[in-house]
Image (cartoon, rainbow, N blue to C red):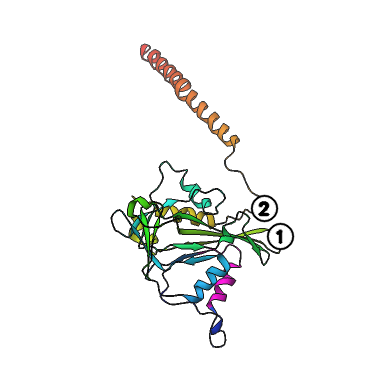
Amino acid sequence: FGPDSDFKGYEAEATSVNEISVVRKYLNAENHNLMVFVDPDTPALPNLDEYMKDYWGVTFDDNLVYSKVGDDHAIFADYEMGEGSIGTNLTSSLTTLDSLPTIVFNKARTISVSAKYLELDGIYENNATKYTGPAFITPTDSEAHYKDGTIVSFGNSLISGDAVSDPAPLLTLSYETWHNSDNEKIPTYVLCCGTTDFASEETLEDTSYGNSDVLFYATRLMGKENQPWEIDFIVCNSEGLDSITETATIMWDIFICGVFPVIAVVAGVVVFYKRRHL
């Protein structure tokens, strides 16, 4: 999350720890996933960038995205709805809510995805299949300002008259499947976001935005619940217990409404006759 220095790579193996190798080993273990958040102020990270590009097909572009409407760097992203994109595994959960959450990206940079990772069949290497796709993309009223002075406009040339580019990813989701020693299919997810502000405390607590929903569904997507098997257990929620409770309730109602009044009447009659013979 917003690293202020690069990860040590292969050049550090002789004198220190290869931190990129540590990341790779971490993701090669079961139920291990990764979220990467950087922003335009994040310093150059050549080792991490090389790993993300070579292994996951992700490159963080060297730019800053602005809104063309208010000349601001807070933009409201569009949802990726393209059929077959792995990113829709995340956005599809949000579209089931009563209202579509507004997702804000403040001080963000765009993300490029290698074309081979965008294919429906993904890429197969090292006995694993990998996919990468956008989950949220730049809206039509935004443009990216690169540090070399280049300006790329997204989606609607009528706003500024600039050359138009296809929407660019702001948040991507990568998915890898491999098989363990028991031949079980193991998933690994990597989420990449072009702004650290996306997960800031201020943004997550702002109920007018749905950024917290995105992270909630992302962590639920990445999570795995192991189901125990061949373990004896007792069913607590059984209809048998319900029927017993219902029968007891009926008997109690009969006692209150029928037996108790009869006892009261009999007692009254006994007292009445005793008083007459005094």
**Of the residues tagged 1 and 2, which is closer to the observer?**
1
At 36% across and 11% down in the image, what residue appears?
276
Image quadrant assignment for residue 205: bottom left
Residue sitting at x 53%, y 51%: 89
What residue did someone put label 2 on? 229
Q: Residues within 10 Å of mark 1 (few under 14, many from 20)?
A: few
**Which of the numbered marks, if any, corresponds to residue 169?**
none
The quarter in which the C terminus is drawn is top left
Q: Amino acid at mark 1?
A: Asn
**In this view, which residue lies farthest toward the bottom?**
15
Q: Tag 2, which secondary structure?
A: loop
Identify the magenta region.
Answer: 19-34
Q: Is residue 175 in view?
A: no
Taking 272 as reference, is 153 above or below it?
below
What kind of element bears circle 1?
loop
Q: Estimate the x, y position of residue 137 in percent, counting from the top left.
A: 44, 55
Q: Is residue 31 magenta?
A: yes
Q: Looking at the picture, how far across and down is residue 48, in whole percent?
A: 50, 73
Can you see residue 137? yes
The answer to which image quadrant residue 247 occupies is: top right
77 or 216: nearer the viewer: 77
- In the rendered image, which residue does mark 1 sit on? 183
Which quarter of the figure is the N terminus placed in?
Answer: bottom left
Tell me which numbered mark, 1 or 2, is placed earlier along the sequence.
1
Outermost residue toward the left?
70
Looking at the picture, how far across and down is residue 55, in whole percent? 58, 68
| Residue closer to the observer: 75 or 268 | 75
Q: CA distance from mark 1 to mark 2?
A: 17 Å
Direction top: furthest residue: 276
Residue in the picture at 50% in, 72% down: 49
